[in-house]
Amino acid sequence: GAVVSQHPSRVICKSGTSVKIECRSLDFQATTMFWYRQFPKKSLMLMATSNEGSKATYEQGVEKDKFLINHASLTLSTLTVTSAHPEDSSFYICSAKLGSYSGDTQYFGPGTRLTVL
Amino acid sequence: QKEVEQNSGPLSVPEGAIASLNCTYSDRGSQSFFWYRQYSGKSPELIMSIYSNGDKEDGRFTAQLNKASQYVSLLIRDSQPSDSATYHCAVNVGSNYQLIWGAGTKLIIKP
């Protein structure tokens, strides 16, 4: 149980285009999903917290107009990188949290590697 | 600012020995603590969670928590080459239980 999928697993795009990444919880309902970014040999950096049916909460320094997050259902959250630039190239990982009480575990998707040319 | 500190390593351990990974955190209000394993190019995989002071064992893995010292550790017994990975300590903070991550410790198990 607690399987999270991400699509696509890898994407290469031209500078200036937009890229949408999907995160799905396959066998459970996730009221909260998280989006992370990880640069090579660095730790995960939380970008935003996504709650179903409400606006995402972005971490300091993350541009909400550039990284659009939609959490339209209990099993799907999407991250759209708008007008992507080479510096947006990174490993984007989502996670989904079981339940709604303190201490719940986050289960991670397999990640999406974005390369912007 | 809430922080989680880990030695980045690499930590080199002979096969069959005990690997000891350590982590300290700054937020005394934290209640939930996690160890994740990440292989190169892959996303993190949950190894252990711990919520109470003391030890928690699961197979070859033992997590230890000392809230007074704000210290969490992970012991891996009978280390195998397949245990070679980066191990992240993560701590729950915030109203949405966001995770704050340590930088990760790279563990190398030498055959």
Image (cartoon, coloured by chain):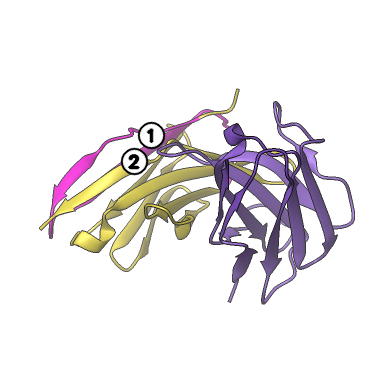
Chain colours: A purple, B yellow
In the rendered structure, the residue with mark 2 lies on which chain?
B
Q: Which residue is mark 2?
A: B105
Mark 2 nearby-residue class (10 Å; few <14, some 14–19, many ≥20)? many
Proximity of marks 1 and 2: CB atoms separated by less than 8 Å:
yes
**Residue A78 visible within the image:** yes
B22 is within the stretch colored magenta:
yes
Badge 1 amino acid: Gln
Q: Residue at x 79, y 48 (%)?
A: A69
Residue that badge 1 annotates: B6
Tell me which amino acid carries mark 2.
Answer: Thr
Rendered image quadrant of residue B59? bottom left
* Quadrant of the rendering where the N terminus of chain A is positioned: bottom right
Q: What crowding class fits label 1: few (fewer than 14 Cα within 10 Å), some (14-19), or many (20 or more)? A: many
| Mark 1 chain | B
Q: A67 or A57, which lies in front?
A: A67
In this rendering, the answer to whether A3 lies above or below B4 is below
Left or right: residue A101 versus residue B90 is right
Which structural element holds mark 1? loop
Give the residues in magenta: B4-31
Q: Residue at x 75, y 31 (%)?
A: A63
The location of residue B2, given as percent across then percent down, is 58, 28
